[in-house]
Image (cartoon, rainbow, N blue to C red):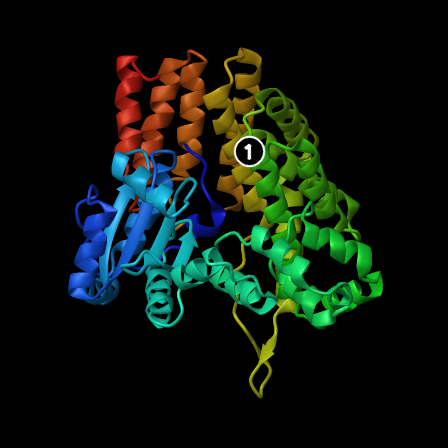
């Protein structure tokens, strides 16, 4: 099964009748804009691809809500388009979207009011996103900033406001951030609030802004910055720096920059070297996968899983989950006069280990033709199925097991020439998928092709 994303795959909501009404997926931007102006509405664009049918199924479930239908029909022209079609590709290029799934909320002029990367079955999230977009109508929009910028406006105050506007809609800011820092007097870079603003933007580690902070700002001030914010915001600082640096490393195919970001990640776990090393290796594997360096990806992935995941037992994973749960409960912020604690969603860390086994097994199925490596991947896939059966908390949603894991196992069997076993497991995947309420069309298509011996 194509890779699944834990953050959204586990969010299941009860749905009502009705759903968002989407217009023809081939409707051009010009027609969308014209209709939106005429009807005085905003535009909702959901871009998806064939690379993750599970993501598309999750989105379909999220869009199926009577509450959404009312809000979206009244306020939005909605379109759902595949980036592998001409129109989907044109929309993605217009709004500088790379990949999918992505949801955009824009006005008729093409200003992005809100952007959500990913998909979710949680309908309320799409309701919240719509309200955010509606709240941002009017006022100074991105196009206004862009016109001023093109006309030569470069004051520090303007650049800061422009950065904040881009950040508001999850657009890149690194180029503007370096320009903003260049407009400041050297002494200003040592200002606590300036340093905080720079860190909030998630500067890349090779950027002028980040390097100047590291060169000019005392370490004691940076430590004070981290201590002055909530733990969540401190984590956001680190994740922003790491995430933007890794993304740039992929964009320019710079292995050394990826290594810097991964090393930074490891340093954030200074109290737990083993966990830090685990995240270091995860980042480098992700980098090799993204830049399609299959030789390094295969090698690092084999070592990573065999030296970590395959050494774990079900009991050790249970202890890991229990320890994480206790820490999660202890870290919750007391609320109200009685000191009640806020309820938060908890994802057991064992689920990430299961998913990594499945996802890397699937990548080996897609990219590797060596029988020995495919046998390894089959072992990883089988382990993910066994762990899910032992540890799963979603037995009501997946009473027959995880269909994605069955699907991966079946495809590996098929590629290894074990056709009868593959058909048996793919049939299990289809039946397990049916009871989840998600579409099983893609899995059933593969099953039929396995039976006919035509699966590619």
Q: In this view, does 449 lie above or below 125?
A: above
Q: Quadrant of the N terminus?
A: top left
Residue pointed to by mark 1: 357
Q: Is residue 379 above or below residue 436?
A: above
Q: What x and y, as percent, mark residue 168?
A: 48, 63
Question: Which of 242 and 121 lies nearest the eye of the viewer?
Answer: 242
Q: In this view, does 17 lie above or below 384?
A: below
**Residue sitting at x 32%, y 56%:** 110
Q: What x and y, as percent, mark residue 246?
A: 61, 42
**Residue sitting at x 31%, y 49%:** 46
Q: In the image, is 350 to the left or to the right of 128?
A: right
Q: Give the number of marks.
A: 1
Q: Can see residue 116?
A: yes
**Residue sitting at x 57%, y 55%:** 176
Q: In the image, is 288 to the left or to the right of 426?
A: right
What is the quadrant of residue 328 in the picture? bottom right
Q: What x and y, as percent, mark residue 80?
A: 26, 47
**Residue sitting at x 78%, y 69%:** 224
Q: Can see residue 202?
A: no
Q: Quadrant of the C terminus?
A: top left
Secondary structure type for disc 1: helix
Question: Which of 409 and 39 lies nearest the eye of the viewer?
Answer: 39
What is the quadrant of residue 225 in the picture? bottom right
Find the residue positioned furthest to the front. Answer: 151
Question: Which of 72 and 133 lies nearest the eye of the viewer?
Answer: 133
Number of other residues with Cα within 10 Å of mark 1, as a class: few under 14, some 14 to 19, many 20 or more: many
């Amino acid at each position: 099964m194509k890779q699944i994303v834990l953050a959204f795959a586990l969010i299941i909501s009860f749905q009502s009748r009705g759903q968002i009404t989407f217009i023809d997926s081939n409707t051009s931007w010009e027609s969308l804009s014209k209709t939106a102006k005429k009807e005085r509405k905003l535009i909702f664009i959901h871009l998806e691809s064939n690379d993750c049918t599970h993501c598309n199924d999750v989105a379909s479930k999220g869009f199926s809500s009577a509450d959404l239908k009312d809000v979206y029909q009244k306020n939005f022209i909605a379109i759902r388009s595949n980036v592998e079609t001409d129109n989907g590709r044109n929309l993605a290029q217009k709004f500088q979207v790379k990949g999918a799934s992505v949801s955009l909320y824009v006005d008729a002029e093409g200003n992005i009011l809100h952007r959500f990367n990913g998909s979710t079955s949680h309908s309320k999230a799409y309701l919240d996103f719509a309200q955010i977009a509606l709240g941002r109508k009017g006022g100074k929009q991105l196009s206004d900033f862009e016109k001023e910028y093109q006309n030569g406006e470069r004051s520090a105050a303007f650049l800061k406001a422009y950065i904040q506007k881009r950040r508001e809609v999850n657009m890149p800011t690194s180029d503007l951030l370096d320009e903003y820092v260049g407009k400041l007097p050297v002494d200003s870079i040592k200002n606590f609030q300036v340093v905080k603003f720079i860190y909030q933007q998630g500067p890349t580690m090779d950027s002028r802004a980040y390097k100047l902070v590291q060169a000019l700002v005392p370490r004691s001030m940076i430590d004070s910055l981290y201590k002055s914010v909530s733990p969540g915001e401190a984590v956001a600082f680190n994740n922003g720096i790491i995430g933007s640096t890794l993304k740039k490393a992929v964009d320019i195919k710079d292995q050394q920059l990826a290594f810097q970001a991964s090393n930074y990640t490891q340093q954030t776990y200074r109290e737990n070297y083993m966990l830090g090393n685990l995240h270091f290796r995860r980042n480098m594997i992700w980098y090799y996968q993204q830049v399609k360096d299959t030789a390094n990806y295969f090698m690092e992935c084999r070592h990573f899983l065999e030296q970590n995941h395959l050494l774990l037992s079900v009991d050790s994973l249970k202890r890991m989950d229990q320890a994480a749960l206790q820490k999660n409960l202890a870290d919750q912020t007391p609320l109200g006069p009685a000191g009640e604690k806020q309820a938060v969603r908890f994802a057991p860390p064992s689920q990430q280990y299961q998913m990594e086994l499945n996802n890397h097994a699937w990548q080996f199925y897609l990219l590797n033709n060596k029988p020995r490596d495919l046998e390894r991947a089959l072992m990883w896939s089988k382990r993910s199925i066994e762990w899910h059966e032992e540890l799963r908390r979603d037995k009501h949603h997946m009473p027959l097991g995880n269909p994605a894991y069955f699907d991966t196992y079946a495809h590996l069997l098929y590629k290894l020439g074990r056709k009868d076993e593959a058909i048996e497991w793919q049939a299990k995947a289809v039946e397990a998928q049916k009871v989840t309420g998600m579409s099983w069309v893609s899995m059933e298509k593969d099953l039929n092709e396995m039976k006919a011996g035509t699966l590619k």
